[in-house]
Structure formats: C-alpha cells, structure tokens
Image (spheres, coloured by chain):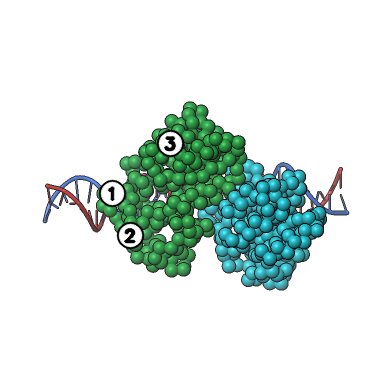
Chain colours: A cyan, B green, C red, D blue
Amino acid sequence: MKILIIEDERSLAEDISRYLSGEHYLCETAATYAEAIEKIELYSYDCILLDIMLPDGNGLDVLKHIKEIKKRDGVIILSAKDAIDDRVKGLQLGADDYLPKPFHHSELAARIFSVIRRKYFDNANVFTANEISVDLLANTVTVNGIPLHLTKKEYALLLLFLGNRGKTIPKSALAEHLSGDLADMLDNHDFVYAHVKNLKKKLNEGGTKNYIKTMYGIGYKWES
Amino acid sequence: MKILIIEDERSLAEDISRYLSGEHYLCETAATYAEAIEKIELYSYDCILLDIMLPDGNGLDVLKHIKEIKKRDGVIILSAKDAIDDRVKGLQLGADDYLPKPFHHSELAARIFSVIRRKYFDNANVFTANEISVDLLANTVTVNGIPLHLTKKEYALLLLFLGNRGKTIPKSALAEHLSGDLADMLDNHDFVYAHVKNLKKKLNEGGTKNYIKTMYGIGYKWES
DNA sequence: GGGTTTCTTCAAAATTTCTACCAATTTAGT
DNA sequence: ACTAAATTGGTAGAAATTTTGAAGAAACCC
C-alpha cells in the first residue's frame, strides 16, 4: 500500500515514513505545495497524509485539487490541535479523517488502516474473497473457516493481491512491496518467486483455487 | 512501445532498461552523443529518455537534433536536480517533460506513460477501437469484454497499430519496434511476419474482424 | 547460546515466448 | 498466364522466464 506524506517539517516526515515503512507501507514525501500537486497529478496513492500548513500554499487547496481532478485517494488531514476551522473545512471538502498533532504512531496507523480498509475492502474488518477470509484487525487468514498460518511477507503479499484484484502487479512492484528498502532489488527477483511460490502452496494446501495468475515477463495478477 | 535511453552511466541505463522492460516497454540504450544521434537518425521511438551530460557532447544538442530532423518522438530530460537552466532550455526546445535525478522507477514509468498516452491515445487510460479494448494502465486487452492473452511483443504490436490507425506502417518500422537488439534485422523480417501472424490469429480467435491489412511490399495497416 | 522459524539464494527442470526455416499460397508486373 | 518476389502458416529449436526444491543466512524466541 502506498502512502504520500505531505509535510514540510522534514524530520517529522521522515519519522512517519520510517515508521510506516516498518508497517509494510510504501512511503513517499512531498515538502511543498508544488511538489504535492505534482505527485498527486502523476500518481495515485492508497492514502495521503496532508499537513495543512505548507511553506508555499495551503493544504486545503491540495485537498481541493485531489477531489477535483479525480481520485479515490484517501486523505487524512494532519494539523495543530486547535485548528477546528481547518478540520471542519477539510471534512467538508471530502477528507476521510482528521488527526491533530501531535499524535502517536499507532494512532496514525489505525487511521490509515481504516481509510485503506474502506477503500479496498468494503470497510469490513473481515474481508472475504471466495473461500478466503482475512481478518484485517487480527491479521489472520482462514480458508473455508480453517485458519491458515502465513508469514509476514506472505501476508503482505496476499493483502497486496487482494487490494489489487484484477490488476497486473509487476514483479518490481512486488519486490518493492516486500523488500522495504527498494534498493537494488531490480535485477534479483528470486525472492519474489520464492514468496509467491510459498503463498500459492499454502493457499493451495488450504484448498483454494489458484487465483494467482502468472503474467509472463511482467508479474502476477489475482483473478477471482 | 519503444524507449531509447540516452545515458552514459551504464549501470543506471541498465537499471532503467530492466525496469521498463518489466513494464511492457521495449528498450534500447545509447551511451554517447554519437551513438544517440546514430540511433535517432536510424530509428524512431515512442519516448526518448535524455541525459543532459554526455561524455562527448551535450544532451540539449541531441534534443535539438531530434526536433530538427523529425519527429514526434516524445522526449523526457533526465538531469541533476539543480540544473534549472537545462530544464528551461529543454522545455523551450520542445521536450515533453523533465525528471530530476535521482528519481524513482515508478515516477519515471508514470512520466513515460503520460507522454505516450498524450501522444497516441488522447490522454485516455482505456482505449477502445470497435470490439477491442485496451487498458493501458493494467496492460490488458479485451475483445467484446472477454480477456485476450497477448505476449509482450504481440501487445507492443497491437499498441503500435492502434496508435497509428489508418496509416501504413512499413515492415522496417515494425521490425524496429519489436527488435530488442536492433541488430541487422534490416533485411530479415521473418520475425515480423511471425508476430503479425500470431497477433492476427489471436484477435481472430477472439472474434474480431481482421483489421490488419497487408500492404504488399510495404507493410501493414490497421483499418477500422 | 541453542533451537526454531523465516527469509534469501541458488541451480536444475518446466514452461512460455521468440525466431528461423520451409513449403504453400498470394500478389504485382510483364 | 507466367515469373519473381512477398506473404502466410506450420513446426521446431533457441532463448528467456518461471517453477521448484533444497540449502545457506538471517532473524526471532526462549
């Protein structure tokens, strides 16, 4: 899952980025209004964290922009505790949530989780696709009611697939998603093969059909 | 879609090439000014990635050359973050976009995609021609709503046809677009025949009319 | 620290795609 | 209608990619 952090205070942005990376999110940052607009126009994110005060503009304008030009990107507004005005305006403009600074990491994670859940998983805590069922809060998986033990990476992989059903996910994206540091995983995708294999195997032993299709030369796709 | 990567730092060029290959692009590289000019004169590309600093010349001169002698090849300039001058000059000279180094692979892919979409497909993400529909983001093809599985080269071929509807495409151009190493494929077009044949067959089995007309002695043409 | 689990690397086997080749067919020009 | 060149369609070997199992590293848990 991909997060954009729009925040001009660099140390805070990096702090958040580091924490969320450890929670299996892929993070990017934008420190200015201009940079934020650029990234929003070019990419899509699962969730955007939006600081209201930016050196060269107002975060609410960024939000307006997001909602104008498209998109179903989730938005969580970050701002000072007492800026009630911003909060009201933000939610009116279509923000998904509001988090006053300072906040706990765990609280941020919970809000992001909730936004993503709403966006990809019909807002349910338990997401079911055919015979597979995922408890997003407990982070457990069952197949036909029987618990299935997955490792962290396998679970991350499964969520990525389920959140992108029907879309082809390039190997490089899988590598990025699994590897945390998107270093030089560019030429070595062996570990992706390994994890996909293991996930497939476990799902299969659990008795599911094979929903993970290979897109030769590109990546994989979840087909329900 | 065919990309030319003009970049003297070999490892970077290879990185990019590998990544873009995984995203359905056909890549070639040029490491020097001379090599770049040579390839540009000989072939055409859908998008050219242009490093400004080359060991034997300036990338802006390459850009000038591109715009002089032809072409609707899209150009994205790659250069150091603070080279504002180059950016301005580049855009004045007709570059389509500018990407400061270092950049994320996904960011590069997004810019290339945007250039190509603008150039060939009226800025749309899903492109439909009669009963055929191509999702440029997911890289999938459907015929009358039924998914059609194409290989990389077949997909590249289809995109080339759809991007040039009504125009006769010479065999040599098809060979260029399909050939990974632009060896002396100039006299041997057997592999073009093969891929056109396979694409025709799959489209036909999918139930489309035969839109690919043979222009005897010249090439092929997509006729809607 | 020892034992267990998980992650990554490696190499051979299987699969998919690509290219070369050949015979049959079509085309353009005479 | 005949000829030479170009294209089609099939097949097979080459090349590239993925699968698979096993083993070595690394991380984790008492």
**Is D17 situated above or below B92?**
below
> What residue did someone put label 1 on?
B218
**Could one spot residue B116 in this view of the protein?**
yes
Residue type, mark 3 in image:
Lys
**Residue denoted by label 2:** B223
Mark 3 / mark 1, whichever is N-terminal: 3
Quarter location, residue A156: bottom right
Q: Could you say whether the residue bearing mark 1 is in a helix, strand or loop?
A: loop
Asked if one can make out residue A24 in the rendered structure from this viewpoint, the answer is no
Q: Residue farthest to the front?
A: A85
Left or right: residue A102 compared with residue B141: right
Whether pointer 3 and pointer 1 mark residues with C-beta atoms closer than 8 Å, the reply is no
Query: Are both tags, 3 and 2, on one chain?
Result: yes
Residue type at mark 2 is Glu
Tag 2: Cα neighbours inside 10 Å, few (<14), some, or many (≥20)?
Answer: some
Marker disc for residue B19: none
The residue wearing badge 3 is B64
How far apart are the alpha carbons under marks 3 and 2?
34 Å
Dot 3 or dot 2, earlier in sequence: 3
Which is more N-terminal, label 2 or label 1?
A: 1
Name the spot of residue B113 as percent of width and height, x first.
51, 51
Which residue appears at 46% of the width and 68% of the height? Answer: B145
In the rendered structure, the residue with mark 3 lies on which chain? Answer: B
In the displayed structure image, the side of residue B133 where residue C4 appears, left or right:
right
- How far is the residue under mark 3 from the one under mark 1? 30 Å
x then y, percent, for residue C24: 25, 57
